[in-house]
Amino acid sequence: MTIREVSIRDESIRLGQFLKLADLADNGSHAKDLIEAGDVTVNGRPETRRGAQLHDGDVVAVGGEKARLVSSASRE
């Protein structure tokens, strides 16, 4: 399974926002539903908090799709 890299400018992003940015969720309501259903993992562990802070290198998975957060702020 390939892991797509998704870049952000800041040092962190909330899980719900990242799901939308990475195209793992269609919109905020879909992201909320995925999280509440237990369909989202962060670094291999189930995550149920939509506001959970993600940082550089975190890997988010939904179903068979994975996306790694790449923060340009942490690279400066």
Image (spheres, helix red, strand yellow):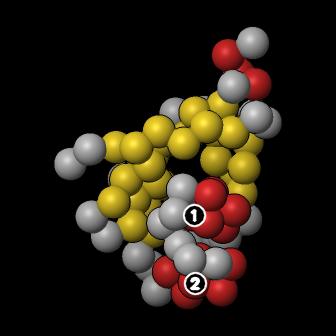
Residue 36, x across and y down, in percent: 54, 84
Q: Which residue is mark 1?
A: 19
Reading the chain from its start, which is encountered first: label 1 or label 2? 1
Which image quadrant for residue 50? Answer: bottom right
Question: Is 63 left, or right, of 25 in this rendering?
Answer: left
Which residue matches tag 2?
30
Residue drawn at the location 54% of the way across and 42% of the way down: 6
Give x and y (percent) for residue 20. Answer: 61, 65
Q: Is residue 75 left or right of residue 37?
A: right
Residue 60 can be seen in this image: yes
- The secondary structure type at the circle numbered 2 is helix
Residue 29, located in which quarter of the rendered image? bottom right
Q: Is residue 46 at all visible to an observer of this figure?
A: no
Crowding at mark 2 (Cα within 10 Å: few <14, some 14-19, many 20+) = some
Give, as a three-letter code, the residue at label 1.
Answer: Leu
Q: Residue at x 34, y 43 (%)?
A: 3
Q: Position of residue 12 (x, y in %)?
A: 73, 42
Query: Quick check: 54 left or right of 69?
Result: right
Residue 61 position within the rendered picture, expressed as x and y whole percent measured from the top left: 39, 59
Report the quarter where the C terminus lies: top right
Badge 2 amino acid: His
The residue sitting at 47% across, 39% down in the picture is 5
